[in-house]
Amino acid sequence: MASPNNNNNKNPKNNQLVSTMIKQGFISNPYLSPSPPHTQIPTRPDNNPSPTRPGNPSPSPTLFDMMSEEQNQNSFKVQHDRVFKVLADAPFPAVGDVRLTIAARDGFKVSMDVHRRVLVGKSRFFAEKLKGRNGLQHSVEILDCDDVEVYVETLVLMYCDDLKKRLIGEDVTKVLGLLKISSAIMFDDGVLACLEYLEAVPWSQQEEEKVVSHLSQLQLPDSAADILQRLVAEPSTSSRSDDILQRLLTAVLHAKDDKARKEMKKVISRLLRENTSNSSSHESNLDISRDTLYHFCHRCLTSLILSLSEATSVDDNRQDRGILMGEIAREADNLQWIVDILIDRKMGDAFVKLWAEQKELSVLHSKIPTMYRHEISKITAQLCVAIGRGILLVPKDVRYCLLSTWLESLYEDFGWMKRAGRSIDKKLVEEGLGQTILTLPLAQQQTILLNWFDRFLNKGDDCPNIQRAFEVWWRRSFVKQYTVDSQLQLALFDYTE
């Protein structure tokens, strides 16, 4: 074999090799002789240090150097094993007329003998580079490969009669790599086989993002657009998102199977929250109408009032009384769900006023046994938590009206709310209620908290413990007092001094 440094060897027959060099593509080496008829085991460059000059010893390797070397060795071993496995089953000839070497950036490389007729017949890139060189033996080197294994796999595909069958069972990431190499070397059959595979198989969410990224970067035939049809909605479909949501909400609210209804509520709520978070980054195309959500609120309120009216007028011994009570709990649960969606989407301010004005419903509520009606009080708790966290912004007269209408009911039902389900967070409700009270004028705080003080002493744990709000009111009233003059100047009177 001729050496790259041998300048005496000028035999043109030994140097009739492809002369084009392409980064991340192909290099012809004009000094290589025809290669031996076999596939070469994958190798890597020797990492042993070069000899040092006398009197100038090299420094001892650091711990970092030794760890890096060990990591490189492990990486090489993994690559070696994977590529060797592919080569073991590769249909490459014992003797070929092209010696093909594939080299990675880290120096890992593998050489193999392949047929010129296969390269030229399958790849328009090879056909161009090897044109007019019949009867000659060539050496081609592919440099700076991202993944040597995928390059070798692509060459294996060129020898396959049934590419579709060959790809069965491969993961999406591997096929995307094969697609990238096939596109780069203009291996059209490989490109089409990969596209057919990607169109037919399911994708995970991570794979979905990779597919979109790869297809947007590669120059592919029109058939690639078919693959993205599962992700791209028709313009008419995206414009009807509100209609679709209305249909889904209607189906959930009228579901006959209670377990399925609760499960689908969780699913839709989670999806809508994802949509809300994506809206801030302009990635969402789902526009939920405020009118649609409030339409469902009014429907649930109407059903709730009708159910309560019927339940209060029936005999206690009536057989279907239990069914009516179940309907009350169901409608209240439905309304909680819609209110939760409104709060998540920052549309709940108008509902606070709507709920505060439900005087008739509040009166009917007091006539129903607590075990059935406590779901209604959860709606009040929802609103207080949101107001207490600053998520719902409503005027003080609406906040006071809300508590005037529903606070007594919340007190009465609180014990059942704690015991009847895991969905209520006692501490969260108490904190939200206390903070809501503290947003009111001081005189209204006093009225509400003195009333709570008496009730708590008689009811104990069956009454919300808003002691912290009581202490804040006390300090505002008797420890530190502020006065405001007509010019909005504040004066502080601290009775602790």
Image (cartoon, rainbow, N blue to C red):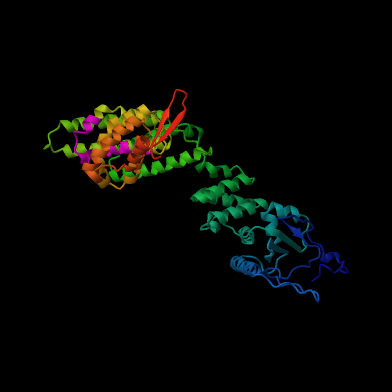
Q: Which segment is the magenta one?
A: 362-385
Q: Is residue 146 visible?
A: yes
Q: Is residue 213 left or right of residue 354?
A: right
Residue 187 lies in the magenta-colored region: no
Which quadrant holds the N terminus? bottom right
Residue 248 appears anywhere in the view: no
Residue in the foreground of this view, choosing between 211 and 359:
359
Q: Position of residue 342 (x, y in %)?
A: 39, 35
Say left or right for 217 vs 342.
right
* Residue positioned 77% across, 67% down in the render: 34
Between 320 and 9, which is closer to the camera in this rendering? 320
Residue 126 lies, in percent from the top left, at: 71, 55
The answer to whether 160 appears left or right of 418 in the picture is right
Tell me what residue is drawn at x 79 percent, y 61 percent: 17
Instruction: Please provide percent x and percent y for residue 33.
Output: 79, 68
User: Given the current orientation, which residue lies at the most extreme front position?
Assistant: 497
Q: Main secondary structure of the magenta part?
A: helix
Magenta region includes residue 380: yes
For the C terminus, which image quadrant?
top left
Residue name at image x 43 percent, y 42 percent = 271
Identify which residue, 447 or 35, lies in the foreground. 447
Q: In terms of image quadrants, where is residue 368?
A: top left
Looking at the image, is 291 positioned above or below residue 70? above
Q: Is residue 273 above or below residue 153?
A: above
Q: Quadrant of residue 221?
A: top right
Q: Position of residue 140 (x, y in %)?
A: 74, 61
Q: Nearer the viewer, residue 297 or 402?
A: 402
